[in-house]
């Protein structure tokens, strides 16, 4: 049976990209708290993940230039923390941030000396972004008088050891999640995108997988809804960069959303649709830039609209079609395997 008082709110990197947006997110969470028990999932702040990947790439080539992107990360997070943390917490949280930055530097330094950044080390480096954004948002909520605690998803999401694209052990993770969440420490702010193996090694679930973390938590907790907060007003009828007059789709089915996501729409990570669809949990995709907008509601299969037979259009750029022909290919064993 679903618990009607749990709601998952996931905020992407653009939604918490700077101090003003983090404070806006804190207001959204506070409002949600008056209606349900929110469980928050966050991505890394702004372009943190890209900067870490840049540092990892430079380090893997033996280039000491990895120091520069790490310095940018350090400066950005320190600036936000000093502005939003209460005086009582600032010293302690600053030490946490310093320890995390130092670990990040050590991992990059080791990769630079070896001239290689293994998938295991890359995952440990990438975890920095979500861990710090969860800490920052929880601190912001507490400074606004809302009890909140940051939750390291490595403690509740058990995965295999396919670093970079780890698969979640849902049976074990379900037990860990239900023991820990929502919890008694106020609003839990959970790190998206990361998990850990049974031996405690840090893993990541794939690029953009914070959406998947959110829908997985929603399914395992029997949430009433999962809200994906981003920088656009829901799913649009087309890419606004290519079609300036694209408009939001107010209702869409799971299958339609999945097709749009698989073929180029960036509003949601495709694997994230399945846990919500399977559990029958409504998804709502909303804009942090204007929370008053209704966004897009994702439900089960919707009846066809005779006046609007096409719900939306998406496209994959820079794609090429290769056509292989030949009479000799007909009936040849493992033809497709050999071609690919």
Image (cartoon, helix red, strand yellow):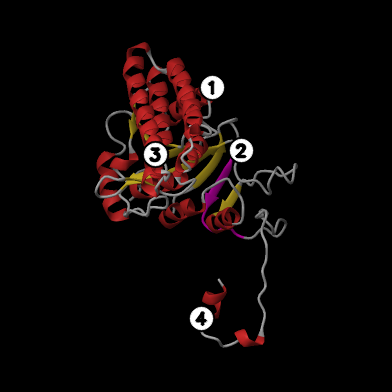
Q: Is residue 313 left or right of residue 88?
A: right
Instruction: Classify the position of the C terminus by image quarter.
Output: bottom right
Q: Which residue is mark 1?
A: 20
Packing grade of label 2 (10 A; few <14, some 14-19, many >=20) is some
On the image, numbered disc 2 is attached to which residue?
A: 232
The disc placed on residue 132 is: none
Residue indicated by mark 3: 113
Residue in the picture at 45% in, 37% down: 9
Label 3 – label 1 distance at C-alpha: 39 Å
Q: Nearer the viewer, mark 3 or mark 4?
A: 3
Q: Is residue 59 above or below residue 309?
A: above
Residue 7 in sight in this render: no
- Give residue 167's quadrant in the image: bottom left
| Residue at horizontal 33 percent and vertical 26 percent from the top | 99
Distance, label 4 to label 1, CA atoms, is 57 Å
Residue that label 4 marks = 334
Quick check: is 122 in the magenta stretch? no
> Is 145 situated left or right of 14 in this image?
left
Q: Could you say whether the residue bearing mark 1 is in a helix, strand or loop?
A: helix
Q: Which residues are magenta?
A: 295-303
Asked which secondary structure carries label 2, the reply is loop
Q: Is residue 30 left or right of residue 179?
A: right
Q: Please identify, in this view, whether the residue under mark 2 or under mark 4 is nearer the observer.
A: 4
Give the alpha-carbon distance from disc 3 to disc 4, as whole Å.
Answer: 44 Å
Q: Residue at x 44, y 54 (%)?
A: 280
Q: Indicate the secondary structure of the residue bearing disc 3.
A: helix
Mark 1 Cα-neighbour bin, 10 Å: few <14, some 14–19, many ≥20: few
Q: Position of residue 146 (x, y in %)?
A: 37, 22
């Amino acid at each position: 049976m679903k618990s009607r008082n749990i709601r998952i709110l996931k905020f992407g990197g653009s939604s918490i990209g700077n101090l003003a947006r983090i404070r806006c997110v804190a207001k959204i969470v506070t409002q949600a708290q008056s209606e349900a028990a929110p469980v928050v999932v966050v991505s890394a702040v702004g372009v943190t993940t890209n900067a870490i990947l840049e540092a990892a790439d430079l380090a893997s080539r033996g280039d000491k230039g990895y120091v520069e992107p790490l310095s940018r990360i350090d400066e950005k997070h320190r600036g936000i923390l000093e502005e939003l943390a209460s005086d009582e917490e600032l010293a302690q949280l600053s030490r946490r941030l310093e320890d995390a930055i130092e670990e990040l530097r050590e991992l990059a330094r080791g990769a630079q000396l070896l001239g290689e950044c293994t998938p295991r080390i890359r995952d440990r480096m990438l975890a920095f972004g979500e861990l710090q954004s969860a800490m920052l948002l929880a601190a912001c909520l507490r400074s606004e008088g809302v009890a909140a605690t940051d939750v390291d998803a490595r403690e509740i999401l058990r995965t295999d050891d396919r670093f970079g694209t780890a698969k979640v052990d849902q049976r074990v993770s379900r037990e860990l999640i239900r023991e820990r969440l929502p919890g008694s420490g106020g609003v839990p702010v959970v790190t998206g995108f990361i998990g850990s193996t049974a031996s405690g090694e840090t893993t990541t679930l794939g690029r953009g997988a914070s959406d998947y973390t959110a829908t997985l938590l929603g399914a395992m907790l029997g949430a009433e809804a999962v809200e994906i907060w981003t920088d656009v007003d829901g799913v649009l009828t087309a890419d606004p960069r290519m079609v300036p007059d694209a408009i939001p789709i107010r209702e869409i089915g799971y299958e339609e959303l999945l097709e749009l996501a698989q073929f180029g729409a960036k509003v949601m990570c495709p694997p994230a649709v399945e846990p919500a669809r399977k559990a029958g949990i409504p998804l709502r995709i909303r804009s942090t830039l204007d929370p008053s907008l209704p966004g897009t509601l994702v439900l089960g299969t919707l009846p066809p609209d005779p006046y609007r037979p096409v719900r939306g259009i998406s496209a994959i750029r820079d794609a090429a079609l290769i056509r292989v022909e030949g009479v000799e290919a007909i009936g040849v064993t493992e033809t497709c395997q050999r071609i690919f």
